[in-house]
Amino acid sequence: MADSRTVLLASGDGEIGERMPDPQTTDGTPGGPTSGPRGERPRWLVPVIIVAVVALLIGAVLWIGGDDEPERSGDSATTGEVTEHPGAVEHPDEVAQPDLSDEEARDPDDLLAEGPVDAPVALVVFTDFQCPFCAQWSDDTLPTLREYVDRGDLRIEWRDVNVYGEDSERAARAALAAAKQDTLEEYHAALFPDGEIREPQELSEGALVDLAGELGMDVDQFREDLNSDEVAQTIDENAQQGIELGAMSTPAFLLDGTPLAGAQPTEVFTDALDEALAEAEG
């Protein structure tokens, strides 16, 4: 994990992303990114406070300085030219986007990834199997992005945040169990049928195992992997990465290290991807 983190901007208006509800821990008590086993305070909170304090200090300097009459030199008094105000601050025209490319795993053993390890561009996807906008994005945009994967231009790394709770976490473990049998893409699609989420009862262990059987997997091996400590640890670490980055609405993305939020139109992703590929080739 990188030491320096940035909040992934995400919409909560229901149009391009979904604000996560207050989740519950497995024992039914309230939980979530700031409590329970992942109880560390999000790392973005301290930087936000620091920025706010600095902004207030700058504003105070400008306010106090604005009460003074601008000084004029001997020549400027007659020509009408005013000397530069000592409290003036030059603001940049635009704020630079953070580079979070070090959050890409680029791990050849990562089973929750599609595309070559050395693809010129990587897309990290923070998602949840109970998020309707994740299902919509997977149906609308993912097929187009997989064309880039097939050409070797893009690597997709799936990271399930699982803020919706136990059902989401179980489905994420099931996806990894399917990946162990090289059936990640098919299983992922089955969890988001026709761009919709499955009902909670369809994410029970029995339903997930039955789905594996329908897709022709070794059911006994699938059940064993679904409940293994190794799979649980991987899913927990992936979720923690998203939480530490502030991905509190899903879907959220890192495309070539740049945050993107919400199930935005496909061309938003392809335009950004084409630009990143052009830069990589240059």
Image (cartoon, rainbow, N blue to C red):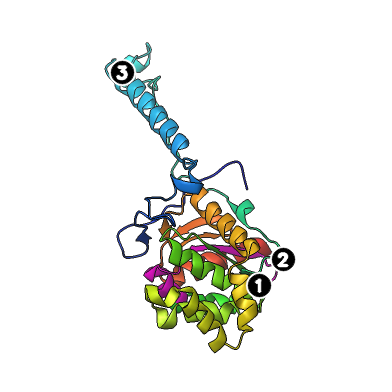
Residue placed most toward the observer, 50 or 241: 241
- Residue 105: horizontal and vertical position, in percent? 65, 58
* The stretch drawn in magenta includes residue 205: no
Residue closer to the observer: 131 or 69: 131
Q: Residue 115 bears which disc, if any? A: 1
Left or right: where 160 falls relative to 264: right
Front-most of residues 44 and 80: 44
Q: Quadrant of residue 180?
A: bottom right
* Label 3, residues with CA under 10 Å away: few <14, some 14-19, many ≥20: few
Task: Give the residue displayed 63% in from the left and 73% down from the top.
Answer: 224
Distance in Å between CA atoms under marks 1 and 3: 57 Å
- Vertical comparison of 80 with 12: above or below: above
Residue 117 within the magenta-colored segment of the rendering: yes
From mark 3 to mark 2, how far is it between C-alphas?
59 Å
Q: The disc labelled 1 sits on which kind of residue?
A: Gly
- The mark found on residue 109 in the picture is 2
Q: Badge 3 is on which residue?
A: 64
